[in-house]
Image: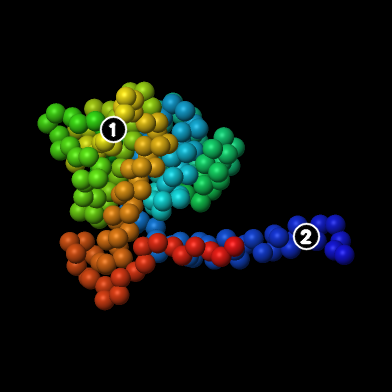
């Protein structure tokens, strides 16, 4: 019979190697230079849900435009924020998150690093508009995908400085989805395309073709 506390100690000893093994296994499937941007979210629960989607789908980073200063500046402090950790199911501990005071600062930062932005939005006159399933999301090596406020949507500034507006086709009486659902749908399509590209090519413009394509789906662990 084990002494009290031995079972917990044993589980703790096994947890670190398991975490390391998982981190190593998922690394090749992360979509490099892909950032999800949440602009001025009003509900912290939605922030946690998007972070969870980002982590589960293999998006590299999350940027949050947070003019209300609802979140701490430091990533480590964010990781320890219980409301975020709970709603993201601890995904915030495993995802890089950076906050900005306003939209302009975030756009400037992205553009300095040569990122192209696309926004999730209904069609906007004068912009390049596509439905999600028709979009080509592997053209740019560095891509930022913007999601707007739950009520107001994406800002005019983000739209004007983006390459295109991406919309999810709607077929019901209700023509909107909540932030958590829409981000999951959009990011699934984009990560699928970019992972497929990464599996075949090492560089942009279909250069550096791999003789043996990399897997695009992580093998299921046996229970």
- Mark nearest the camera among 2 and 1 is 1
Residue 31: percent from left, percent from top: 35, 56
Q: How is the image coloured?
A: rainbow
Residue 35: percent from left, percent from top: 35, 47
Residue 190: percent from left, percent from top: 30, 49
Q: Is 114 on the left-hand or right-hand side of 68?
A: left
Q: Is 60 on the left-hand or right-hand side of 126?
A: right
155 w.r.t. 10: above or below? above
Kindly state the secondary structure of the residue where label 1 is placed: loop
192 w.r.t. 20: above or below? above
State the residue at coordinates (46%, 36%): 47
Mark identifier at residue 7: 2
Kindly state the secondary structure of the residue where label 2 is placed: helix
The tag earlier along the polypeptide, 2 or 1, is 2
State the residue at coordinates (21%, 50%): 136
**For mark 2, does the 10 Å Cα neighbourhood hold few (<14), some (14 to 19), or many (20 or more) residues?**
few
Mark identifier at residue 170: 1
Q: Is 220 on the left-hand or right-hand side of 66?
A: right
């Amino acid at each position: 019979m084990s002494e009290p506390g031995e079972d917990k100690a044993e589980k703790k000893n096994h947890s670190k190697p398991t975490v390391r093994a998982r981190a190593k296994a998922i690394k090749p499937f992360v979509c490099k230079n892909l950032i999800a941007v949440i602009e001025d979210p009003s509900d912290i629960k939605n922030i946690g849900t998007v972070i969870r989607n980002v982590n589960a789908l293999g998006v590299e980073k999350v940027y949050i435009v947070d003019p209300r200063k609802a979140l701490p500046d430091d990533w480590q402090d964010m990781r320890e924020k219980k409301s975020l950790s709970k709603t993201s199911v601890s995904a915030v501990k495993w995802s890089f998150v950076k906050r900005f005071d306003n939209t302009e600062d975030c756009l400037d930062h992205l553009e300095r690093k040569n990122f192209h932005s696309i926004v999730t939005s209904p069609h906007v006159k004068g912009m390049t508009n596509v439905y999600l399933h028709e979009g080509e999301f592997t053209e740019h090596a560095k891509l930022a995908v913007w999601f707007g406020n739950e009520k107001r949507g994406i800002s005019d500034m983000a739209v004007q400085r983006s390459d295109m507006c991406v919309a999810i086709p709607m077929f019901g009486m209700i023509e909107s989805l909540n932030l958590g659902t829409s981000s999951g749908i959009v990011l699934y399509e984009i990560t699928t395309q970019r992972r497929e590209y990464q599996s075949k090519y090492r560089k942009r413009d279909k250069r550096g073709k791999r003789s043996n394509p990399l897997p695009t789906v992580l093998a299921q662990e046996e229970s």
